Image (spheres, grey):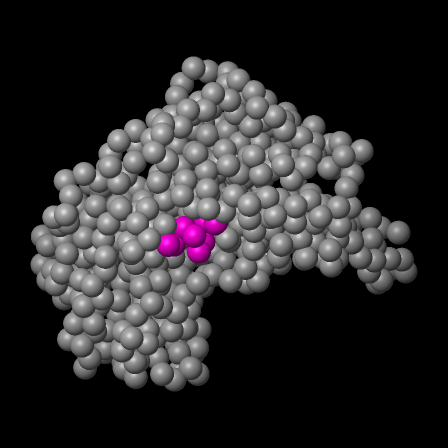
Amino acid sequence: MTNAIERDSLFIGGGWRSPEGGGRITVISPNTEQALGSVPEGAEGDIDAAVAAARAAFSDRSGWGGWTAAQRADAMERLADELDKRSAELARAVSSQNGMPIAIAQQLEAVFPQLLLRYYAGLAREYPFEETRPGLLGGSTLVTAEAVGVVGAIVPWNFPQALAAFKYAPGLAAGATFVLKPSPETVFDSYVFAEAVAAAGIPDGVINIVPGGRELGAYLVAHPGIDKVAFTGSSAAGRSISEVCGRLFRPVTLELGGKSAAIILDDADLDLAKIGEQIFGATLLNNGQTCFLSTRILAPAARYSEVVDTLTGLAASLQVGDALDPATQIGPMATSRQRERVESYIAKGKGDGARLTTGGGRPEFTEQGWFVEPTIFADVDNNYAIAQEEIFGPVLSIISYDGDDDAVAIANASDYGLGGSVWTSDHDHGVAVARRIASGTVGINAYLPDPTAPFGGIKASGMGRELGPEGLAAYLVKKSIYL
C-alpha cells in the first residue's frame, strides 16, 4: 500500500452507491503515522438504506429468502473461493491498518474467514432445520428453526476479517442477512471483502457494509429494522449495547474483553524450544491486542523465579518492527490512543510496586510508529490495576501462587471470564484444573479457538456463543407448529 487509497462509495444493496453524508474516514498507518487514504464515513441515511436492502433480500421468497440450505451453502463456498483469491491483499490491508504482524495476518485474517465459511456451509447441509416430534397429548409438533432476520454486526479493529466471519458465516448458513459496520481503524479490507461478495454472486442486499464510529454503531443497534445484534468489542460498549437490546427485547451476542490467566502448574515444561510458540500465541498474539490472551501468568511459588526468567527471556527475544516485515513478531499498537493507554498501565504497574523485568518503553530503532516494547512485570499482586483491567497491549503480569486451590482462586478473582490456559506435563491434571476455571474457554498447553466449538465468555466478557453449531443456533429462531 504505497499509494494512497481513496474510495468514494459504499457497498449497499449489492452495488456501490454514493454516501448520504460528506464525512470521510482517514486511516493512519500505525507503522509510519502517515495517512494511508480515506473512505466515506457512513451516515444514518446509509444505515437506513443498508437495513432496507437487507430486509428486502431476507423477504425475497424468489431469492435469498427462499433459498434452500444447500443453495446458501453453495454461495458460501463461492465466497470462500473468492476470498482465497484475495487472501494476500486482505492480509496486507489489515496489517497496514492495525499493525498486526503480516505473518499473523497471513495465518488468520487471510485464512480463517474461508475456513469458517466452508465449515458452516457443510453444517448447513446437514443441520436439522426442522423436525417432527411426537406429542404427549395425542398429536405431534413440527419444530422449525428459521433465520432470525436482519443482523446488525459491529466488528472491531483487532481481527476485522476473522471476527466479521464469526458473525456472517453462521448467519448466512442460517439464512440471515447483514449490515456490517467495520471499525473506522480498519476499513480498506472491508472493500476487498465487498468485492469478493459481489464476485461470488451473493444476492443483492444479503451483505451490506457501512463503516463508521460509535455513534453510527449506536444508531445501527437501535434501528427498528434490525432483528439481532452481534458485537465484538469492549465490555463498556457491550454493556451499553445490551441495555439497548434489553429494552427492545432484541437478541444480542456479545464477545467482550478479557483478563485471562495462564496457570503454570508445578510440573510444566518451560523449555521455550518446545513451548515458546504456544506461550507466545496464548499471551502476546497480535501485539497483545487480542481479547482472549492470558495476560496474567500464575506461577507456582517454588518455580516463580524460573517462570519470571523464562517469560522475560521470551519477551526480550521478540522482534519488534514494521508490521509488514515478515520477520516482525510484535508490531505497533493500532492507534496512538491505544499506545497511550498501554503506556498508562505500564506507569500504573510501576507505581503500584510491580517489578519491571524487561520492556516498559518504546523501542529505539524508530521515532515513528506507535510501538511499545514487550513488557513483563514480576511481583504483581492480583489486585493491581495491571492484573485486573484489560490493557490490550504486549504487557504480562506474573503472579505467585501456592497450590492448585490458590491458583484457581486467583484466576477466578476477575471481572472477566473469556479465555485461560493451563500448562502442565500431566494432561489429566491440566483438564481437572481447567474445569475449575470460571471462563468460557480454556486451553491446555496452548490456546486457539477451534471453529467446531463454542467460543464466548461469562461475566464482563459477554453473553452468547460464536463458532460451532452453537454459533449457527444463535441466528435461528424456533417455531412450533402443532399438528
Residue 344's spot in the image, x, y percent? 17, 45
Q: Name the main secondary structure of what is drawn in magenta.
A: helix
The residue at 67%/53% (across/down) is 121
What is the quadrant of residue 183 in the picture? Answer: top left
What is the quadrant of residue 130 in the picture? Answer: bottom right
Residue 418's spot in the image, x, y percent? 41, 58
- Residue 213 vs residue 385: left or right? right
- 376 drawn magenta: no
Q: How many marks?
A: 0
Between residues 12 and 58, which one lies in front from this camera angle?
12
Residue 327's spot in the image, x, y percent? 29, 56
The residue at 73%/32% (across/down) is 59
- Residue 409 vs residue 151: left or right? left
The N terminus - image quarter:
top left
- Residue 121 vs residue 102: left or right? right
What is the quadrant of residue 262 in the picture? Answer: bottom left
Q: Is residue 295 above or below residue 324?
A: below
Residue 168's spot in the image, x, y percent? 58, 44
The residue at 22%/66% (across/down) is 314
- 109 drawn magenta: yes
Q: Is residue 247 visible?
A: no
Between residues 54 and 8, which one lies in front from this camera angle?
8
Give the magenta range. Answer: 103-110
Q: Is residue 325 visible?
A: yes
The residue at 61%/26% (across/down) is 15
Between residues 60 and 28, which one lies in front from this camera angle?
28
